[in-house]
Image: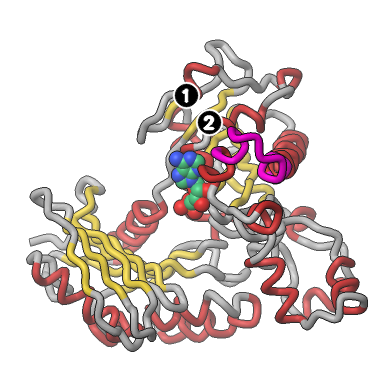
């Protein structure tokens, strides 16, 4: 029997998200989430997707990632999909930071683990959690190929002119300070799916991808290669996000330290967790913000306007970076669902060939679709992202090549 299944693991500091896919057709066999690992109130929600299975929940304390993965393995086994199945080909791990070292998915060995560990200083929140997930999975199935798929990899094609900050070169290099970009798996998947929607090869099209979720980033993709992206050394740079400020004069930080008396950690928390939409109006969910705007809430309206202003600036900037734009693609929670965001983001950009058809924009659905008027110079599209499928596909392609 050929092994065609891939388990995708996304390990956070206190959570593990997972999906089991069959790569014969990319179908999902099971998915789930373990939350609040290490707390008394841990929860595992497991959903088998074969035979219309219903979700099961465990609400017992789950002490650490090892216990979490063991619990996941038990749930999968209950559906006949256990980690010991001969049909399981590999485990694909989402790894947030691959620095300049990893430009493509990589089969994990001890040297790869050491390199991911070396990158912890540039990804102190994410890489340790990703490493814990990998180590635990390797302990459970030491014989099984495990692949790291990096959030930064798609952006490693950025030219130095886009990747470097204009700061002292020696200082930058000593501390590996440069723009790495994130959400790369999504930008890769969506830019390719947009080319497909246009009936073209990715090498023929230039796309601006707007990944608008709770975290948000834009990228300029030229003929399938990323040439610029809005996130930088960390995911803090760029667009206004659910809880992150995005772009800001760096001197705000000195001011908060000198005049505001805040510590480095306090400022880190302020800019990453208490800024963006939540900082501006107290809500980070675009549904709630739209509801408040409909009720005449001025604070929510201002937050929305700041969000849109920044988004529009990036569309203009990436238009200039690319020179010719074939498509603008909206994706992730906000991009896929919030028609008013899409409408406002391209409003007034008719001069650039960008427009949205009101009726098409109002259509909801899971399939990639065009929302620009027929015959528009630049296609505007909604292209649902699928990071798990992309991680599984990259993992499987690599394993097949190595067999
Ligand atoms: P993500 O990080 O891609 O899962 O996106 C999560 C965000 O998408 C949420 O915080 C909401 O702001 C937004 N979102 C999800 N569903 C909708 C919807 N139906 N309308 C507007 N925004 C939505």
Picture residue at 54% right of the left edge, 63% below the top:
103
Q: Are discs 2 and 1 less than 8 Å apart at CB?
A: yes
Picture residue at 54% right of the left edge, 55% below the top:
184
Say if 382 sits above or below 221 in the image: above
Which badge, 2 or 1, comes first in the chain's sequence? 2
Along the line of sight, the residue nearer the viewer: 209 or 213: 213
Picture residue at 44% right of the left edge, 64% below the top:
149
Q: Where is residue 294 in the image (x, y as percent from the top left)?
A: 59, 33
**Could you say which quadrant of the image residue 64 lies in?**
bottom left
Spatial CA distance of label 2 from label 1 is 6 Å
In this rendering, does residue 191 appear at all?
no
The residues colored magenta run 291-303
Report the number of discs: 2
Label 1 CB, ligand 1: below 8 Å?
no
On-image quarter of the C terminus: bottom left
**Could you say which quadrant of the image residue 293 lies in?**
top right
Position of 267 with respect to 187 (left or right) is: right
Q: Is mark 2 on a helix, strand or loop?
A: helix
Q: Where is residue 186 in the image (x, y as percent from the top left)?
A: 49, 50
Q: Is residue 91 magenta?
A: no
In this rendering, does residue 294 appear at all?
yes
Other-residue count near label 1 (Cα within 10 Å), few / some / many at <14 / 14–19 / ≥20: some
Picture residue at 81% right of the left edge, 80% below the top:
262
Other-residue count near label 2 (Cα within 10 Å), few / some / many at <14 / 14–19 / ≥20: many
Along the line of sight, the residue nearer the viewer: 262 or 7: 262
On-image quarter of the N terminus: bottom left
Residue linked to disc 2: 339
Magenta-drawn stretch, dominant element (helix, strand or loop): helix
Position of 141 with respect to 365 (left or right) is: left
Q: Is mark 1 on a helix, strand or loop?
A: helix
**Residue 362 numbered mark, or none:** 1
Say if 155 sits above or below 268 in the image: above
């Amino acid at each position: 029997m050929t092994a065609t299944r891939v388990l995708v693991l996304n390990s956070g500091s206190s959570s593990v998200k997972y999906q089991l896919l069959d790569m014969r057709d990319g179908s999902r066999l099971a998915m789930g989430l373990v939350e609040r690992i290490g707390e008394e109130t841990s929860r595992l929600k497991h959903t088998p997707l074969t035979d219309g299975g219903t979700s099961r929940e465990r609400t017992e304390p789950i002490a650490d990632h090892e216990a979490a993965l063991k619990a996941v393995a038990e749930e999968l086994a209950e559906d006949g999909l256990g980690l010991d199945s001969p049909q399981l080909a590999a485990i694909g791990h989402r790894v947030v930071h691959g620095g300049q070292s990893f430009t493509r998915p990589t089969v994990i060995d001890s040297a790869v683990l050491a390199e991911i560990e070396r990158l912890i200083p540039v990804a102190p929140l994410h890489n340790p959690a990703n490493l814990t997930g990998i180590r635990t999975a390797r302990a459970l199935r030491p014989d099984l190929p495990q692949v790291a798929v990096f959030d930064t990899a798609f952006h490693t094609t950025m030219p130095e002119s886009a990747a470097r900050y204009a700061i002292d070169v020696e200082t930058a290099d000593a501390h590996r300070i440069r723009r790495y970009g994130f959400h790369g798996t999504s930008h890769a998947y969506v830019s390719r799916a947009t080319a497909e929607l246009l009936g073209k090869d990715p090498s023929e099209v230039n796309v601006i991808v707007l990944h608008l979720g709770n975290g948000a980033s834009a990228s300029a993709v030229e003929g399938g290669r990323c040439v610029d992206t809005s996130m930088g050394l960390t995911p803090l740079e760029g667009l206004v996000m659910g809880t992150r400020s995005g772009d800001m004069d760096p001197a705000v930080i000195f001011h908060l330290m000198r005049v505001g008396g805040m510590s480095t950690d306090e400022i880190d928390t302020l800019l990453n967790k208490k800024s963006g939409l939540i900082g501006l109006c107290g809500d980070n969910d675009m549904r709630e913000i739209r509801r408040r705007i409909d009720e005449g809430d001025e604070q929510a309206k201002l937050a929305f306007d700041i969000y849109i202003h920044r988004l529009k600036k990036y569309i203009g900037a990436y238009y200039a970076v690319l020179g010719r734009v074939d498509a603008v693609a909206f994706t992730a929670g906000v991009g896929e669902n919030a028609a008013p965001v899409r409408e406002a983001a391209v409003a007034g950009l008719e001069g650039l060939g960008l427009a949205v058809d009101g009726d098409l924009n109002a259509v909801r659905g899971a399939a990639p679709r065009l929302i620009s008027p027929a015959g528009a110079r630049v296609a505007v599209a909604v292209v649902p992202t699928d990071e798990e499928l992309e991680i599984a596909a990259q993992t499987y392609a690599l394993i097949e090549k190595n067999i």
